[in-house]
Image (cartoon, rainbow, N blue to C red):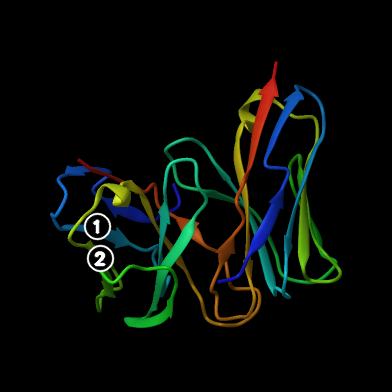
Amino acid sequence: DSGVTQTPKHLITATGQRVTLRCSPRSGDLSVYWYQQSLDQGLQFLIQYYNGEERAKGNILERFSAQQFPDLHSELNLSSLELGDSALYFCASSVATGRAGTGELFFGEGSRLTVL
Amino acid sequence: GQQLNQSPQSMFIQEGEDVSMNCTSSSIFNTWLWYKQDPGEGPVLLIALYKAGELTSNGRLTAQFGITRKDSFLNISASIPSDVGIYFCAGDPNTGNQFYFGTGTSLTVIP
């Protein structure tokens, strides 16, 4: 158990809909990352938050947005869903102090999104 | 974004054999991480490397941070069936903790 909690584990929805994925980081971790993994693909970095503020953006579509709340949990919002958005969405957390030697990512078990 | 080339893409080996895989980048990284992912589950951190030349072991796994800081290697000795899975490398080009992942090496161990 990594200590990172993601909900829901599975989600099935229709095209055009909107969903929200939730992540609770490990206790003490200030940074949350979101990754997308399509079938048999690698992990694509979407976005990173640190202590409530956006720190880095990757290949995140404009239809997707995220935020990190004061209690450090994060939500990833996916709207106007398309078939191609079907994927595993992983949240990871780290201490992320910016100092060398502190950068270890711990992943949740993922949310599997199926868009029909 | 950063490109990490991981090889080989897949490996089929006999139980008991040793395994080697590597990851290279076009730029210098300050941190290298190695993960294992089982189907439908989240990646699990195996080894973290923070210094060029560093060699770190975790049981039968050994990983090295390349001297050039543009590559990293993972070795698995005496493979067993539960080693089956996809192994990912991840690198952070700076201490901002922004990690980029390799494309993965799929390992199959034949009993």
Quadrant of res B1: bottom right
Give above or below for B32 relative to B14: below
Q: Is residue B66 left or right of residue A99?
A: right
For the residues bearing labels 1 and 2, Cβ distance under 8 angstroms: yes
- Where residue B2 appears, as percent x and y from the top left, is 60, 70
Badge 1 crowding class, 10 Å Cα cut-off, few under 14, some 14 to 19, many 20 or more, is many
Camera sees residue A108: yes
- At label 2, which amino acid type do we have? Glu
- At label 1, which amino acid type do we have? Leu
Q: Is residue B101 left or right of residue A115?
A: right
- Where residue B42 appears, as percent x and y from the top left, is 45, 46
Viewer-proximal residue among A43 and A103: A43
Q: Is residue A96 left or right of residue B66?
A: left
Give above or below for B107 relative to B72: above
Give above or below for B29 relative to B80: below
Q: Are marks 1 and 2 on the same chain?
A: yes
Q: Residue at x 84, y 71 (%)?
A: B68
Residues at marks 1 and 2, CA–CA distance in whole angstroms: 5 Å
Residue corresponding to mark 1: A21
Viewer-proximal residue among A13 and A110: A13
- Where residue B19 appears, as percent x and y from the top left, is 79, 37
Disc assigned to residue A93? none
Camera sees residue A32: no
Q: Which quadrant of the figure contains the C terminus of chain A?
A: top left
Task: Kindly identify which chain the residue marked by label 2 belongs to.
Answer: A
Residue corresponding to mark 2: A75
Looking at the rendered structure, the secondary structure element under dot 1 is strand
Looking at the rendered structure, the secondary structure element under dot 2 is strand
Mark toward the start of the polypeptide (1 vs 2): 1
